[in-house]
Image (tube, rainbow, N blue to C red):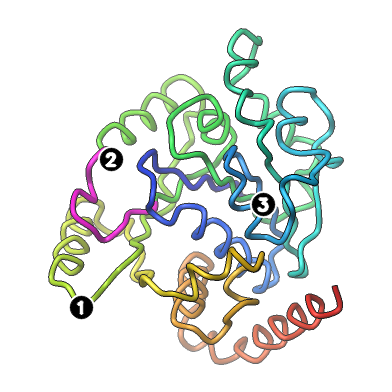
Amino acid sequence: MKKIAFCNQKGGVAKTTSALNIAAYLAIHGKRTLLIDLDPQANATSGAGLNKNDVQKSIYNVLHEHIRIEEAIFPTAIERLSIVPSNLNLTGAEVELVNVMGREYRLKKALLTIQELFDYVIFDCPPSLGLLTINGLSAADSVIIPIQCEYYALEGLGQLMKTLDLIRENLNESLAVEGVLMTLADYRTNLTKEVINEVRQYFGKKVYQTVIPRTIKLTEAPGFGKPIALYAPDSPGAIKYNNVVKEMLGISIEAETIIKQEVTENILEASHGEEIR
């Protein structure tokens, strides 16, 4: 089971959009995937089709009340994609856990009982470097850092990298940078190209070749409670997120043609399941 945290304390970088849609395409590519929403805003929960106001058991109950994580796992409209939702209760979790022994490892311990159930676990961390994010980083094998293609793109990354170093030194020595994902690209501007070049110089081969564009469909999809693979599977944003997952899985161009039909069938099957619901 590979555990990946999506993390950037800078807001507005398409962190939740990326976590949700990459989790969806991992599932579509046949990987048993669990998305854990660690953000009190619960946008990943809503984007996956759950009503955060109706959720009775969430990651809050797992972290604060020690319920088994299996009790808080819900299916989604995409086969093989499940979610542990969030809700507003999570807002107080950092304060409530501050004096708890082993508070940084609550999530890591909770995951021990589901090691064999999933191939990938994706953490959508909040846009801060507080206790919830620390739980995600302590439990994760690696981190994906979304960076928007805008001015000051690298602002705050120095602090994030220092935090990752501290996590390695004190809580999770094996934590690695899985990749850096460029988001919200607008190729009509020279700034986008300049930022992409700057980030590639800074992070080198850790930067994914695929760049996520700024598109209306990606903005609309969460409002309908659907990942982009269900809402607009042929849109540029959908194609790009699918390509990121192909990079993650090491799918070559030759292999891509072989599995293309299977992936299309999985998307159609998931869409059919959504219609039934």
Give the left or right position of residue 74, taking residue 242 as reference. right
- Marks 2 and 3, how far apart in space? 26 Å
Residue 191, quarter of the rendered image? bottom left
Question: Magenta stretch?
Answer: 146-156
- Relative to 228, residue 113 above or below: above
User: Which residue is tagged 2?
Assistant: 157
Label 1 residue SS = loop
Q: Cα distance, mark 2 to mark 1?
A: 25 Å
Name the front one of labels 2 and 1: 1
Crowd band around label 1 with a 10 angstrom C-alpha radius: few (<14), some (14–19), many (20+): few
Residue position for label 3:
45
Q: Amino acid at mark 2?
A: Leu
Magenta includes 152?
yes
Query: Which of marks 3 and 2 precedes in the sequence?
Result: 3
Q: Which residue: 79% across, 49% down?
A: 116
Image point (22%, 56%), residue name: 199
Q: Amino acid at mark 1?
A: Arg
Q: Is disc 3 placed on a helix, strand or loop? A: helix
The x, y position of residue 23, in whole percent, is: 61, 61
